[in-house]
Amino acid sequence: MHNLYTFNPHNPNLTKNKLDYIWVNADTLISTFDSKILDVNPSIKTDHRIIYIELLYEELFYNKTVSKPRKNPSRTIYSYKDMKAEEGKWNWKNYNKDITDALKNTSIKLTLNRIRDIQSIAELNQRWNQFQNVILNSAKKNIKN
């Protein structure tokens, strides 16, 4: 945004600070016209500055698609009481093995570097959905439902 500090203390022994991030949803970001850090001293006696954002009203409130009522999500109930440790059709060993095998897939495998390389919420959601699907697929296959 700007390299101005949002906190400029009157006391010289205190450190100046600025906000690192301001999180907004995509609609607000797209609707942003301008942003500034405003110094309000001496009008208001404060050691903080105001963060000002100007939004495009039309972009924020118009041209939105009419939302449709959501369907109730389906629900699966798993019978954990029928699970065995290692033997039988429904067992934890196969459940864990299927998850371990699926996570070895290079497109899903999460290493420390891959986690650090996540650059957006969309990418984070994609990784989470892949991980979630691995667990659900193993559960559907290995846990009685």
Image (spheres, rainbow, N blue to C red):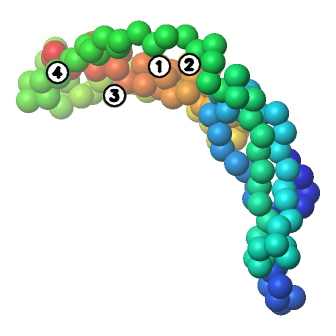
**Could you tell me if the residues under marks 1 and 3 are in contact, i.e. CB atoms within 8 Å?**
no
Q: Which is more N-terminal, label 2 or label 4?
A: 4
Which amino acid, by three-letter code, is at mark 4? Ile
SS category of the residue bearing label 1? helix
Residue 92, picture quadrant: top left
Label 4 neighbourhood size at 10 Å, few (<14), some (14-19), many (20+)?
few
Label 2 neighbourhood size at 10 Å, few (<14), some (14-19), many (20+)?
few
In the image: residue 66, left or right of residue 109: left
Q: Which is more N-terminal, label 1 or label 4?
A: 4
**Could you tell me if the residues under marks 4 and 3 are in contact, i.e. CB atoms within 8 Å?**
no
Mark 2 highlights which residue?
A: 105
Q: Nearer the viewer, residue 128 or 22?
A: 22
**Identity of the residue drawn at 85% across and 59% down:** 38
Which mark identifies residue 77? 4
Q: Which is more N-terminal, label 3 or label 2?
A: 3
Which amino acid, by three-letter code, is at mark 2? Asn
Mark 3 highlights which residue?
A: 96
Residue 104 appears in view: no
SS category of the residue bearing label 4? loop
